[in-house]
Image (cartoon, coloured by chain):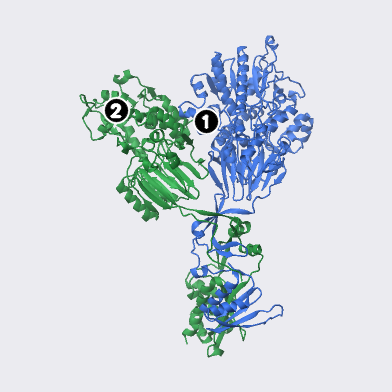
Chain colours: A blue, B green
Amino acid sequence: MKFTCLSKGGGFHFPPCHVLNVCGFRILFDCPLDLSALTIFSPVPTGYRAVVDEKDSDCQPYSTLDSDCVTWKRQKIGKPLDANDLICAVPWYKIVKYLHLWNVSFIDVVLISSPMGMLGLPFLTRIKGFSAKIYATEVTARLGQLMMEDLVSMHMEFRQFYGPEGSTFPRWMEEEELDLRPSALREVVLGKDGAELGGWMPLYSAADVKHCLQKVQTLRYAEEVCYNGKLVIKAFSSGLEIGTCNWSINGPKRDIAFISSSIFVPAHAMSFDYHALQGKDIVLYSDLSSLDTMEGIEDGYSFLTTDSFSTLSWEESAQSLLNTSEHLEEREKLYYLCSCAADSLKASGSVLIPINRLGTFIQLLEQISASLESSSLKVPIYVISSVAEELLAYTNVIPEWLCKERQEKLFSGEPLFAHVELIKDNKLHVFPTVHSPKLLINWQEPCIVFCPHWCLRLGPVVHLLHRWSGDPNSLLVLESGHDAQLALLPFQPMEMKVLQCSFLSGIKLPKILPLLNVLQPKITLLPEDLRQKVRFTNVNPFSVFHYSENKTLIIPSLKDSSELEIATDLAFQFQWRNLKHENMNITRLKGELHVAHGKHWLHSGNKPSKSNSSKSRPLLHWGTPDLETLLSILSKMGINASVEQGVGVEGSKKACIVHVHDPKKALIEIGDTGTVISAVDENLASLIFEAMDSILDGI
Amino acid sequence: MKARQRGSQKEIKFHSMAIECLVLGAGQQVGKSCVVVSMNGKRIMFDCGMDMAYHDHRRHPDFSRISEYGDFDKALTCIVITHFHLDHIGALPYFTEVCGYRGPIYMTYPTKALAPSMLEDYRKVMVERRGEEEQFTSEHIVECMKKVIAVDVKQTVQVDKDLMIRAYYAGHVLGAAMFYTKVGDSAIVYTGDYNMTPDRHLGAAQIDRLQLDLLITESTYATTIRDSKYGREAEFLKAVHKCVLGGGKVLIPTFALGRAQELCILLEDYWERMNLKIPIYFSSGLTMQANMYYKMLISWTSQKVKETYSTRNAFDFKHVLNFDRSMISAPGPCVLFATPGWISGGFSLEVFKQWAPSEMNLITLPGYCAAGTIGHKLMSGKPSKIDLDKDTQLDVRCQIHQLSFSPHTDAKGIMDLVKFLSPKHVILVHGEKPKMATLKGRIYSELGIRCDDPANNETVCIPSTHHVEVGASNTFIRSSLNPNFNFSKMSSEDESDSRLKDGKFMPWLQVKDERAAEGILVEEKGKRAKIVHLDEFLLMLGEKKHDIRFAYCFPINTDNLEDTKSTDVSSSSNALSVSGRSSWLPMLYIKLSDELSGGNIQYFGEQIQVESFSVSLCLKDRCPYRIVDSPPNKCEAVFFCCAWSIADEKLAWKIISILENRNYGTL
C-alpha cells in the first residue's frame, strides 16, 4: 500500500488531496481548487463607488471582545501591495499543485468527501483517457454542482468585461510579466518552490460541469458499493457540512478509514459517525484543520487557535469527543456576529456577509432573523446568488442528512430550516444577481446581504463592496484564515468595518488522540506537521507514520494472507488427513475462486468433481518409501513380490525394482524422486498404488 | 512410517442452522402483517400490523407465540416496519406500550414521520365510533415513536455486531421499503408491500442483486396481471371532472396523510393541464401543515416529482384552499378533501349528509373502509338509503366512485422480483390462499425455487448458508486468479480430415479457460486454517516430492491396424499415402478420437496425450513395463508404451482397453 499526499490544502475551502495505492488500485481523494489564489486578480471594475460621507468617517474602530472564544478584529490596512499590482485579466484557476504531474488515466477511483473537494473535478473529467469511477454522496454531488455552476456564472462577468479569452497562454503568466509583479503575488502564482505554474487552468464551462456530474456515482451515507469486486466502499457522515463524508474502504487484505475534516456535534449536518470507522486496520488522518489555525498565529493574525482557549480536560475517552463546548463556542460566535450586525444596522449601515459555508450561512440566517425580530429591527435580508433559490429549497428536502435536532423538525412536521418561513413571510428575499429587476424594485438600505464569493473577486460581493466600502457604519463579515489584506486591496480605502471570524472546520487538536484511541487502528497516518503537536506515548497500541506533501509513503502489509470464505457444501467434501509429526490437519481442496464484495470466495465449481474413487486418492506424495514396509504391506494384500536391487543406470543412485508375480505380473520401480508402477491390470495397479500410498505421506 | 488418519477431528466447525420463519399475520390472508424470523441466533419481527376486520384479540398478531412469558426484549432483536399502513404498523404502539417491548424499532424516515398521524386517526375513529376501550392512547403513540430509529434507503445499518439491515425503495406508498437482513452468511429480504411499476408520484421498487437464502414477498395480486395504474387514475380524474363540469361537488373523504396528498397531486396536475379554475378545498382536519411532511420528503417520490423541488415543490398545492364550514352549502362546484377517511363521523360525515342527497355530487371512496363505518356501507352495493343512526335515515342519490388503484405489484412483478433475486427459497404472505397456491406452483415450476405459503401461526424452517472463513496465501490467490488456458489444437495430419467430416469448418485452435482454484487447506494447532498452493506446501513442510506414476507397455496387432487404415483413411478424399510405423500413431489417434467421448486428445507427433496419459511407440526390445505376455504372432505386433499419473487412473485404463479391444477383438 502506498500513500502520497499531493496537497495539504489550506482551510475549509481548500481541502487536502491525496493518492492511495491499494489492492492494485489507485484512489484519488478529493480534487479541490485553491480559490484563495484568485485574490491576485483584480475584480471587474464597477461603475459606481459609494461616496463616503465625511461625517461618518470618524467611526469608532470596532472593539474586540473580551470573550475567550472569539477574537474579532478591525482590519488595519497597511499597504505592502497596491491595487494596481493585481492582474487585470480573466482569472485562471489553480488546482492541486502536484496533481498535474500525475497521469490521470491511471486513476481508478476518485472519492469526493465534500463539495469543496469537488470543485476541480471537471478539469479531470474533461481529460481524454480519464476513466476513474467517481463516488460522492448525493448531497455533496448536488451542492458541488451548485457551487460549480455558481462559479461558472460569476466568472461570466469577467468574460463579458475582457472579451473572450484567447486560446493561448495569458500574458500575465509569462516570465517577464511575472518578474514585474511584487514577490508576494509572484509566490501565489508560482508557489514557494516555483512548481505551481502548471496548476493554473482556464475555468471549465457549464457543459464541463454537467459532463462531470454525469460521471459521479452518488451514494447515501452507509450505502455499500463494491469497486471491481475487491474494494467495498462506504461513506459515513463527517459532520463538517451537510453531505460531507469520511470513507471506509474494505479490501481482502486490509480495512482502511479515511478521515477528512470532521465535526463531532455540528448544529446542522449529521454528526461525525466515527463509530463506523472503528476497528479498521489503517486510519488515514486527513483533517488538517488544526494546522490552519496554527499557521494563522505565525502570520500574526489574531484569531484564536484550538489550543489557546481549550479548557477541555484531556480525557482519553469517547465521552470527551462529544462534549458540547465547541458547539457552544460556535453558537456564541454567531450571537456575537448578530449583535455586531445589529449595531451596524442601528447606525443605518448595511451588513455584507460573503460567507459561502452552507452551514454557517443557514445558521446565520436563522440567528440574524431571530435577533432582528427580538430587537424589532425591520431590515430586509437579501440572498444574492445564481443558485441561492435552489440551494435554499434543496436544504429543506434532505432531512436524512441533518443532525438529530433538525430531524426532529421533520417528525413534528416543521420546516427543517427557518428560511422557509422567512421567505414566505417576505423577510428574506432571494435574487439571482445584483442586476435582477426584482432586486432593484425591492432594494432597501440598510439591509443584510448574503452573497458570494468569499475571495472578494467574484460575484455580487464585488459590487456591494464598491458600494459600501466607504461607509464606516457598514459591516463586512469575513471568514478568517485568508489574507484579508490582499483580499481587500482593490477596495481601498476601506472605511467599512471588517469583522473577521473563524468557524470550526474540523477536529480540534486535543481531540485527535482520544479519537484514535476510540478507533483502535493498527496503523495511523498523520501529517508530518502534527508530529510535534500530537505526541504518542509508547503505550499506544498502533504504529504511526507521518506523511508530507509529494512524498510517497509505503505502508507495510499487515497480513501475509487474505481472507477467504469457503462455501459449506465444498467444506463438507473435505477429506482431512492428519500429519502427526507436524501436528497438522491437511485437506486438498478444489473449487472456483470468486472475488466479490471485498472478499475471496471459494465455491464448488459447476463441474462435478472427478469420479469418486480418485477423489480420495492422494495426488501428491512426499517422503522416502521403505522397502521392507512395502513388501510386508503387499504381502498382507496377498501380493508376493521380490526385490531386485541396484539397477542404477548412471551409478549415481540406485533405483530398486520390485517384481510381482503373484497373483499377476507387475513391476514397481522405486527411484529417488519417484516410483513407476506397471501392472497387467487395473486392479493390481491400484492395489500397489494403495500400498505405496500407505508408506508415503501424501495429499 | 508416519502415522496418518483420515477424517480426524477438526477445529473448523460447521453449524448447520436453519432460518425459522414464524408467520403471525398475513399468512394466507390480506390482513395484519407480522412475520418473525429467527436466523443465526437473532430474531427479527417484520411489521406489526393490525387486522381492522376484527374487534377482539384477533386484530393483533398472537404475540404470545414470540415469548410465552412476555419477555419480548429478550425474545426479539429488533422490529422492522416496512411502511405506515395500519395493517403493517397498527399494532406497534400496543406491542411497545402495552406489551412492553423496549428494543429497537427500525423504519424509514417517511414512515417515522407519517405513522403517528395514521395511528392517531385510526385511534380517534375507533374511540369515537364505539367509545370502545382504547388499545392505545395518544401518549402511547408518542412514546412508541420515540423508540424508532429512522433509516435511509440503501443505508447499511448495523443493528448489533452480527445483524445488518438495509432498506430498499419499495414504491408502494411514500417511504415504503423492502428490508434486506443479514446475519453472518444468512441473508433474507422481506418485501412488505411493493410496486414494480412507477406511478405518478412514486417510483418503482428497486433492489440490488443479492445472495439470498429466503425471500418473503407479498402476493396481493398473486394471479392478476394488471394494466397500468394510469388508466384507473384517469378514470378517477374523469369522474371528478365530469362532476364539477356539471356543477356538482366532489367529496373526497381521506385521512390527514397519505391518500390526501397522493390524490391531490393528481388533481393539481390535472387542473394545471386542463386549466380548471374550480376550487379544491382541504377541510380543517387536513391542514396544509400535513403537506409539509410531503414537501420535506420529496426525495422519496418519483423522479419526475422530485425534480420539481427547486422551482416549485409539487406538494406546494397551488389550487388548494382552506375550507370553511359555511361553504358547505355555498353554490357552485368544488372538490373537498375532508377527514376522517371512512366517513365514520366528524367533518366528512357532516358534509356527506349535506351533499349525498344530490345526484349532481360525487363521493369517492378508498379501497378499504372499516366495517361499521358509512364508507363501508356505501361500498357494499349501491344503497339508496343509509341509516345514520337509529332514528335518522339519509337518501343517497349522489354518484359513488370507488378508487381502485392500489399500488401493489401484480403477478408479473412478483415473478420478476423472484427471478431477479433468485433466492434459495420463497415464502408468500399477504395474499389470498387459492391465488397464493397458484403462484407458489409457478415459482417452483418456472423458476425452480422452493416456495411456501404458510398460514397464520405456522413456522417454516429453511436451511441457511454458511461459509467457513480461512486465510489464503498470496500464491494460492494469484494462481487461482490466473487464467489457465487450455489449448486444443487440430493436428495437421488429421485436420483436413476432420474439418471436412462434419461439413463444418472447425477452428484450428480451441482455447478454454479452465481456471480452478486448487490448493491445500492446512490446519495447525493454535493457528488459523490457511490455504496454500501445492508448490508452497512442500516448501512449508520441508519435504521432497515423491512422484508415483503408472506405466504400461502393450502390443497391438498390426494386421488389424492395417484394416483400420484402409477403412478409415482410404475412405476420405485425400488418403494419406503414409505407411509403416510412423503412421500407426496417427491411426491410434483417429481411433481414440472416435471412441473416446470427451477428453482432450492431443497429438504431438511422437506421442498422443490425454490429460496426464501419454502413449508413444515403444521401440525397445525389452521394455521393463512390458508386463503382458506377447501375442503369439509377435513379429506382427507393434508395441506402445503408456504412462500416466493417479489422477487419470480411470481414463488411462479406459483408453488402454479401447486400444487393446481393437487388438484382440479381431483375433
Disc 2 to disc 1: CB gap under 8 Å: no
Locate residue A631: give its quadrant: bottom right
Of B112 and B207, which appears nearest the observer?
B112
Q: Chain of mark 1?
A: A
Kindly identify which numbered label has been placed on residue A404: 1
| Residue at disc 1, secondary structure | helix
Mark 2 and mark 1 on one chain: no
Give, as a three-letter code, the residue at label 1: Lys
A359 or A646, nearer to the observer = A646
Task: Specify few, some or many for label 2: CA neighbours under 10 Å numbering under 14, 14-19, or 20 or more.
Answer: few
Q: Mark yes or no: residue A72 visible.
A: yes
State the image quarter where residue B199 is shown: top left
The residue type indicated by label 2 comes to Arg
Expressed as whole percent of the image width and height from the top left, the position of residue B203 reads 43, 39
Q: Secondary structure at mark 2?
A: helix
- Residue at 50%, 65% in the rendered image: A609
Q: Is residue A689 above or below residue B29?
A: below
Which disc is residue B129 wearing?
2
How busy is the neighbourhood of tag 1: few (under 14 within 10 Å), some, or many (20 plus)? some
| Res A384 quadrant in image | top right
| x, y percent for residue B63 | 37, 40
User: Alpha carbon of mark 2 to alpha carbon of mark 1: how far?
Assistant: 38 Å
Vertical arrangement, residue B426 with respect to residue A195, above or below: below
Q: Give the chain of mark 2.
A: B
* Side of A295 where B31 appears, left or right: left
Give the label on residue B562, or none: none
Q: Residue furthest top?
A: A55
- The residue at 58%/62% (across/down) is A585
Which x, y percent locates residue A685?
54, 77
Outermost residue to the front: B69
Q: What x and y, as percent, mark residue B370? A: 30, 33
